[in-house]
Amino acid sequence: MHRLFMGSFAIALYLLPTTALYHNNEHDHWNELRGLTINGSKGLNTSQNQNSRLPLVIDTFQNPTHNDLGFWHGSGENLSVQHEPGFIRLFPTDPDQNFHTQFDNHLCYSLVPWYNEFLHVVFEGTDQFSVSLNQHNDECNPRRSPFPSVADSVQADRYVMHPRSEASGGDEDGDDDEDWDEDWDNEVDMDTDRKSKKHRNIGNPRNSRLKYSNETVEIPPGRRELYIPLTHFEIDFNRVVSVSFNGFYTQEPITLHCVEIVPSVPPPSPENGHFHLPGKLPSGRLVLRCSRPNSFAFGIDDGQPQFSQQIMRILDEENVRVTFFVVGAGLRDPSSNFSTFYKEMLKKGHQVALHSNTHPKMEALQTIREIDDEIIQTVQVFKEQLGIGSSYFRPPFGTVAARLRQQLARHIPNPYIVNWSVDVEDWLWANTSTPEKQLEAFYRDVSKGGNLAVMHYLHPTTIGYLPQLIQHVKGAGYEIMRIDQCLEDVSAPPL
Ligand SMILES: [Zn+2]
């Protein structure tokens, strides 16, 4: 059911073992790569350089395996790509797929000096994807779990510059924002702006001259540009790993030409459709680890009704409290008896939290309305069937990017969006001739520092291993608790 959504990212470890890895200062390093010397400054954080300094060119796709900083770029989750010097073309089929371009191989890269600048992306094709900035783990060690750790994501189409073109005249349907009016009716500020732009005949930037890779060059027809304030990515800027493209809700190709950080955006003008930056939309709190020292939490998802009594008995016997992520439609189904079961689990002190209404890959849904429907329905059924609300949500399949995060934050104040750093991999091994690989997977992730688990009670083998998993965690010195407790949520019940 669940997939290790960032697993294939690990291949980054094996590439480019250059001396650059051990360079004392990453900023000097990129300057060297680019043949620059900047005033002997190490941090480049002087404000007088703000408007005069050159862009930090991350990637112009000259090389198939590494970017302009000398570090790995590549795809994950079987995303097909086509590389030619100067661009990479992505052929997405799934929102879990991703393309990363890294700031470093092993280290935590500090983007602090660029905090007030802008991520600039030049691309062609659809804008139905997310752009993410990924954070390293606490130890800045890619062999520890999770790697990468959290990310923040923005929705690309909100940041696209829409230059005006004489050539596009009159085609009212010529833009690709057909869902705009429906999806964003309540959005502040941008709504009227975007609608009015629609009436100004958005088209290709045929006549615009814009900053691109440190030179004022003409952006060829068909190319589009994103400007994203780095402040819109709420991660730790001392520990950045990569920029990534993910959350595709399209199967149209996307061609990336340039990823860079620039000090400013072009001022509003007729040529760029009077482009102005949208506001940051809240995106909740993505968590993959417990924060409380020595804590460990099990997040147990989905489940088969016939195994619920067995799960309850094991948790009673082991005297541990866990968090269940429950699908709304299952609670409504009287034949599952889940409503009675989870009321009982709440009485016993377990946490019961949201896992969508019908368990789709929510980032793959075409419209915001469908995403909203999954959230609103499950909130409603929790209220009706269990008499509770929850601000904890686990995305089905762990699939999460900008749109789901934004809509969760719109309906649930400051939600916790909970993935994991320990995966029992029941979805991979439970029904095979080697079910014991579930134990290996769990032990491996615990040994790598993971402390927030994902599992399901869908298969007898997984349930059979649960006492061993609990014993293993206790034996390693952890205290097992609910996820809200392990995250030190002030509204969680006392331990
Ligand atoms: Zn699930």
Image (cartoon, rainbow, N blue to C red):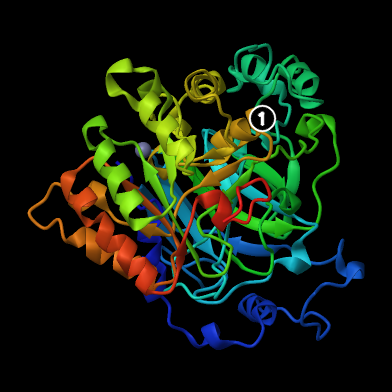
Q: Quadrant of residue 169?
A: top right
Observer-nearest residue: 254 or 1? Answer: 1
Give me the residue at 38% from left, 60% from top.
422
Check the image and report above or below for 110 versus 269.
below
Residue type, label 1: Arg
Quadrant location, ligand no. 1: top left
Q: Secondary structure at mark 1?
A: helix
Q: Position of residue 459 (x, y in %)?
A: 19, 43
Which quarter of the image is occupied by the N terminus? top left
Q: Residue 294's x, y, as percent?
A: 51, 70
Percent across and percent down for residue 183 are: 62, 19
Residue 256 vs 378, above or below: the answer is below
Residues 230 and 427: in front is 427
Q: Is residue 482 above or below residue 94?
A: below
Viewport quadrant of the C terminus: bottom right
Q: Residue at x 43, y 25 (%)?
A: 328
From the viewer's side, name the closer residue of 475 and 269. Answer: 475
Quick check: 74 left or right of 467?
A: right
For the question of whether residue 232 can be seen, the reply is: yes
Q: Residue at x 60, y 13 (%)?
A: 173
| Residue ID for mark 1 | 410
**Which residue sits furthest left?**
433
Residue 15 position within the rendered picture, expressed as x and y whole percent measured from the top left: 39, 74
Q: Residue furthest right?
A: 48
Residue ID at (62%, 72%): 109
**Is 88 rendered above or below residue 409?**
below
Q: Using the rendered view, name the quadrant where residue 243 is placed.
A: bottom right
Q: How many marks?
A: 1
